[in-house]
């Protein structure tokens, strides 16, 4: 604690101001990046932490303690012989055989030039300090509630155990510690490849030796109480969404002439399938999934872990690749949720199949699969590009238009943005103008649940169409325009909506207590791009877009990290 106090005490005052404490804790926060200005500030704290003598120079003993801490964190051998050799090796990073007095400038130069490594792990909290404070507050609140319960139990002559739930409800609601689990009534069987083979009812396995006697007795005594849980419907092979997925597996697979009972066909081809039956299945799925999605908030709230995928654009091949990598057993048996940022159709050959797949998975796992709207989930856009023609080509003029309208009736009710862990704002295009509801994201929930013509709803339109400005695009004239319009200019590239600056993004994040924005909308060579001071990520999940050579990628939000995953689609 003395070392931390010394590190936080700017100017060696002998006391800490509130800002001193907050700045020091921010430097220790695991989310604080170890690069650029934050790294320089962190290095100052690290230097002061190990400078026990407070001379302004690290001596050999102080430097040795720093090296020892780095080795300990990395799990290296801490024997005296190995340690001494490592210290001598590290001294040479600063051009010295012996560290007698290492100045702050020399230390920061060594770290900045990547000669001295390992400081990123020093002076780090295990959890974000904001979460630590919230957890502490929760514990104190919980303790007070329990003390109040005990006091009232005494007054009530010690209520029996079964009455404590009523008492807890009276004193502020349920405690998470008392949420109960129940036994699922089905068992899934999985191949080594990760794919499902079958699903059985739990009681069907009684007497096979698969279940212990105690479990069999439990089932026998409570079978009437074990109702068919809703999740088992996800594995019902006769359900419409599973029939759709079964059909899409056939569509994906290549069939050669050696299989005499089935006509040969290429992969990603329907062959001799009755497309009217396929259309009927799509229409049914659209009707069902619309009823689910229309009840969702326009601004989704999702908890991590979450995989975030960008534009798919009818690339069913890449969508299947993502499935095999990320949710081979299906979303419902995968710990993570999945968020798709729009642009499911147009420009690719298989927009119908992509939509059918995503809608079917949404029906099977409505709380795990989330879809938001992009600028290609608009009728006028699809007529200008390829999806409208794709529907008529695959199903004929009349049925094709019916399918197209049914799919767009679902697009009309898609949410337009999402927030992960109350910190990561996810959208198809970009941040909106601050003139909408004082720039607060809560304004998004005021967008109508059914939005057939988004062009008439400015906030939704901007969320679907806006783009970030790149540094190379900014001229003196643009700087002037940005200063007059809160960091926004007309989006001349698209002929509609706006472009926004890094300053506008910073203000949006600060105003809404957010840390990052993840969006799609623009093709990227490597499938992703980090922009605007590392606070904005663009992700694109369709490789070889329009015949090009770009890669596909997705982002995983988990454990306070945004991890980028590039997909090998070769």
Image (cartoon, rainbow, N blue to C red):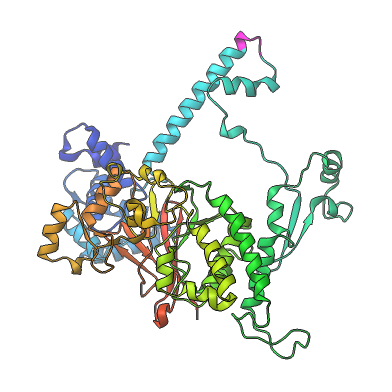
Q: Is residue 95 visible?
A: no
| Foreground residue among 61 and 178 | 178
Residue at 23 percent across and 57 percent down: it is: 502
| Residue 543 located left or right of residue 153 | left
Q: Is 478 colored magenta in this rendering?
A: no
The x and y percentages for residue 440 are 32, 43
Question: Vertical placement of 438 versus 354: above or below?
Answer: above
| Foreground residue among 127 and 157 | 157
Question: Vertical placement of 253 versus 507: above or below?
Answer: below
The x and y percentages for residue 466 are 30, 60
Q: Is 156 colored magenta in this rendering?
A: yes
Which range of residues does the magenta coloring cover? 154-158
| Residue 420 located left or right of residue 40 | right
What secondary structure do most residues of the magenta stretch adopt? loop
The x and y percentages for residue 271 are 65, 83
| Foreground residue among 45 and 295 | 295
């Amino acid at each position: 604690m003395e070392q931390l106090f010394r590190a936080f005490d700017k100017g060696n005052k002998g006391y800490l101001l509130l800002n001193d404490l907050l700045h020091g804790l921010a430097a220790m926060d695991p989310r604080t990046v170890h690069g650029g200005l934050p790294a320089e500030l962190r290095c100052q704290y690290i230097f002061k932490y190990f400078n026990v003598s407070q001379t302004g120079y690290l001596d050999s003993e102080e430097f040795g303690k720093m090296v020892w801490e780095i080795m300990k964190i990395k799990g290296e051998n801490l024997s005296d012989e190995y340690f001494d050799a490592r210290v001598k090796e590290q001294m040479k990073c600063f051009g010295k055989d012996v560290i007698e007095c290492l100045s702050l400038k020399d230390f920061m130069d060594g770290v900045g030039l990547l000669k001295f490594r390992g400081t990123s792990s020093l002076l780090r909290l295990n959890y974000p300090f904001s979460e630590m404070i919230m957890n502490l507050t929760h514990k104190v609140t919980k303790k007070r509630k329990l003390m109040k319960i005990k006091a009232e139990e005494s007054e009530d002559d010690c209520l029996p155990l079964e009455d404590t739930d009523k008492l807890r409800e009276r004193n502020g609601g349920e405690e998470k510690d008392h949420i109960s689990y129940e036994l699922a009534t089905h068992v899934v069987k999985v191949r080594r490849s990760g794919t499902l083979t079958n699903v059985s009812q739990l009681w069907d396995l009684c007497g096979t030796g698969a279940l212990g006697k105690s479990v069999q007795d439990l089932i026998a005594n409570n079978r009437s109480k074990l109702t068919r849980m809703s999740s088992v419907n996800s594995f019902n092979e006769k359900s419409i969404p599973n029939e759709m997925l079964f059909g899409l597996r056939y569509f994906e697979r290549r069939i050669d002439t050696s299989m005499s009972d089935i006509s040969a066909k290429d992969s990603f081809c329907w062959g001799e399938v009755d497309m009217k039956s396929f259309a009927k299945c799509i229409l049914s799925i659209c009707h069902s999934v619309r009823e689910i999605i229309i009840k969702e908030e326009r601004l989704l709230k999702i908890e991590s872990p979450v995989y975030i995928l960008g534009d798919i654009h009818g690339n069913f091949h890449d969508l299947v690749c993502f499935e095999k990598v990320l949710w081979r057993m299906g979303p419902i048996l995968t710990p993570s949720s999945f968020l798709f940022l729009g642009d499911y159709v147009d420009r690719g050959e298989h927009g119908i199949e992509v939509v059918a797949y995503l809608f079917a998975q949404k029906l099977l796992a409505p709380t795990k699969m989330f879809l938001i709207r992009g600028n290609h989930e608009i009728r006028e856009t699809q007529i200008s590009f390829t999806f409208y023609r794709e529907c008529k080509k695959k199903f004929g003029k009349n049925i094709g238009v019916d399918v197209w309208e049914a799919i767009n009736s679902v697009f009309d009710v898609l949410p337009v943005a999402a927030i992960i862990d109350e910190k990561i704002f996810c959208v198809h295009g970009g941040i909106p103008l601050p003139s909408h509801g004082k720039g607060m994201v809560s304004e998004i929930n005021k967008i109508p649940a059914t939005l057939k013509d988004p062009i008439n709803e400015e906030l939704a339109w901007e969320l679907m169409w806006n783009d970030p400005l790149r540094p190379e695009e900014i001229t003196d004239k643009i700087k002037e325009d940005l200063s007059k319009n809160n960091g926004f200019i007309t989006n001349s590239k698209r002929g509609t909506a706006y472009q926004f600056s890094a300053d506008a993004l910073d203000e949006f994040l600060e105003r809404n207590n957010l840390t990052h924005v993840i969006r799609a909308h623009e093709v990227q060579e490597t499938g992703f791009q980090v922009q605007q001071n590392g606070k904005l990520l663009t992700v694109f999940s369709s490789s070889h877009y329009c015949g090009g050579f770009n890669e596909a990628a997705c982002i995983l939000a988990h454990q306070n990290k945004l991890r980028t995953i590039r997909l090998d689609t070769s």
